[in-house]
Image (cartoon, rainbow, N blue to C red):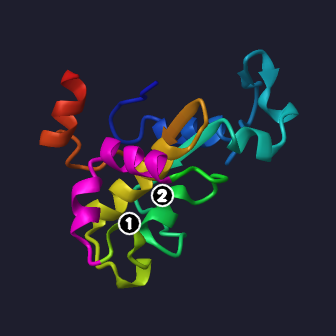
Amino acid sequence: MAVVGRSGTGKSVLAAIAGRLADPDQGTVVLDGVPLSGLSRDELRGAVGYAFERPALLGDTIGGTIAFGIPDPGQDRVREAARSACADSFIRLLLHGYATPCGDAFLSGGESQRLGLARAFAHPGRCGGRGCWPRYSDGPCWRRGRRS
């Protein structure tokens, strides 16, 4: 699922409500017929993954950042998520690749966004939400992804 629209149209609010980062002022939101308010936040976090515009790099290493919060994802899953987010190529250029400590990786804002997106792709959930696509989302990597 993708939600697109102009700035200020409620995309971030919709994503926040889907993951119960916020609750609606009125009405009920359901997932598979179950009101979200009836699900624990932990259950819901297992179904919804997020990629934020300014992600926190929470793992000890670059690979750990992508795998953060996922019990034993395995290297294949982490690398596939990085490839899907067009992050694998710059990660492999780092001194220790996926094992590079986050504090030793000097990343651009766009590279940090791609790591956050990779973390969302690695997440086993059924839904993905994000506040804002990177401004360069129409770049060559994204066009290749749309064609395939």
Nearer the observer: mark 1 or 2; the answer is: 1
Q: Disc 1 marks which residue?
A: 98
Answer few, some or many: residues within 10 Å of disc 1's Cα (few below 14, many 20 plus, some between 14 and 19).
many
Q: Position of residue 72 (x, y in %)?
A: 63, 53
- Does residue 89 sit above or below 141 in this rendering? below
Tell me if 30 is positioned left or right of 78 in this view. Answer: right
Whether residue 59 is visible, yes or no, is: yes
Residue for badge 2: 66
CB within 8 Å, label 1 to label 2: yes
Q: Is residue 104 left or right of residue 17?
A: left
- Please check the rendered image and state whether residue 7 is part of the magenta-colored stretch, yes or no: no
Q: Which residues are magenta?
A: 75-95
* Relative vertical location of residue 15 with respect to residue 27 in this rendering, above or below: below
Q: Residue at x 34, y 54 (%)?
A: 114
- How many angstroms separate mark 1 from mark 2 (CA)? 9 Å
- The answer to whether residue 23 shows anywhere in this view is no
Q: Position of residue 132 (x, y in %)?
A: 39, 47
The image position of residue 51, as x and y in percent, is 47, 49
Q: Amino acid at mark 2?
A: Ile
Amino acid type, residue under disc 1 in the picture: Tyr
In-front residue for pair 93/4: 93
- Disc number placed over residue 13 in the picture, else none: none
- Report helix, strand or loop for mark 1: helix
In terms of secondary structure, what is the magenta stretch mainly?
helix
- State left or right for residue 26 relative to residue 68: right
Name the one closer to the observer, 63 or 22. 63
